[in-house]
Image (cartoon, rainbow, N blue to C red):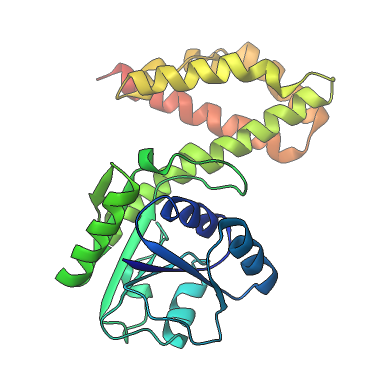
Amino acid sequence: MKITIIGSGNVAEALIEAVCNTPHTVRLWARNHARGGELSSRFGIPYTPIEMVSEPADLYIMAVSDRAIGSLSDTLAFPQEAVVAHTAGGVGIDALSGKIVHRAVFYPLQTFSGRRIHRFSDIPVFTEASTSHAAAILASFAGTLSVRTYPADSETRMRLHTAAVFACNFTNHLFSIAADLLRRKGIPFEALRPLVSETVDKAFESSYPEKGQTGPAVRNDEDTMERHRRLLHREGPERYEELYMKLSESIWETSKKTSQK
């Protein structure tokens, strides 16, 4: 199958690397000429600036920002029979231009960072298609990249994407705050690795992570929480204290509901 990846960011890079390990042929379209040339050279694939006509493909995958999907898909000239998919979890299939007959979504549920190695076969991939032809092409392609592929309509993907923001983006932000608090006293973030690893392992050993919640908030230990609050108030910024109090309140409310089940 002939695949064209559109974009040059982290998702595009991960997809190119994964497709290069399959029988498919892959080429790259990108607006960022420097980055496009870099990826072309690194992976040994053809690169065409997005404003130029390129060899037709069976499947075009738009690994671009959510905001660019609609306007870019409306601007580009795709072959009538080609399948065009975007990779966004929080954007519906209808974001793709109505001019495209075979619209689709290829959403890998993973956080991608440049130069990190990803075992794509283990990444859950959620797909949606507007026609039976698009569904067949997408299923064939997805199956060569991952052993965990699932159909998911736009509403389902929005739920997955929202959950992923809590589990990944918000969690990493909390890691950043924890690292900042430790850094002020010369303590390496690495000191938290065993604690974080145990927390993650424990959460996935159960279908109900709230059952394994620990800490002063779940016990409603007001004295300890007040000492933490004073430390955060003293060291700031103000949002640290606000987050601490909001999250502690949420944990306490959740623990009360859990105990009643």
Query: Is residue 222 shown above or below 129?
Result: above
Residue at image position (51%, 39%) is 168
**Residue closer to the observer: 132 or 47:** 47
Query: Is residue 214 shown above or below 72?
Result: above
Quarter of the image with the C terminus in it: top left
Residue 237 at least partly seen: yes
Quarter of the image with the N terminus in it: bottom left
Query: Is residue 196 shown above or below 132?
Result: above
* Left or right: where 22 falls relative to 151: right
Q: Position of residue 157 (x, y in %)?
A: 33, 54
Question: To which quarter of the image does residue 194 belong?
Answer: top right
Residue at image position (69%, 40%) is 239
Q: Position of residue 147 (x, y in %)?
A: 28, 41
Residue 153 at least partly seen: no
Residue at image position (71%, 16%) is 227
Q: Position of residue 68 (x, y in %)?
A: 51, 74
* Left or right: where 228 falls relative to 2: right
Query: Is residue 227 shown above or below 90?
Result: above
**Residue closer to the observer: 150 or 246:** 150
**Residue closer to the observer: 149 or 59:** 59
* Left or right: where 15 falls relative to 37: left
**How many numbered marks appear?**
0
Q: Position of residue 47 (x, y in %)?
A: 56, 72
Question: To which quarter of the image does residue 177 belong?
Answer: top right
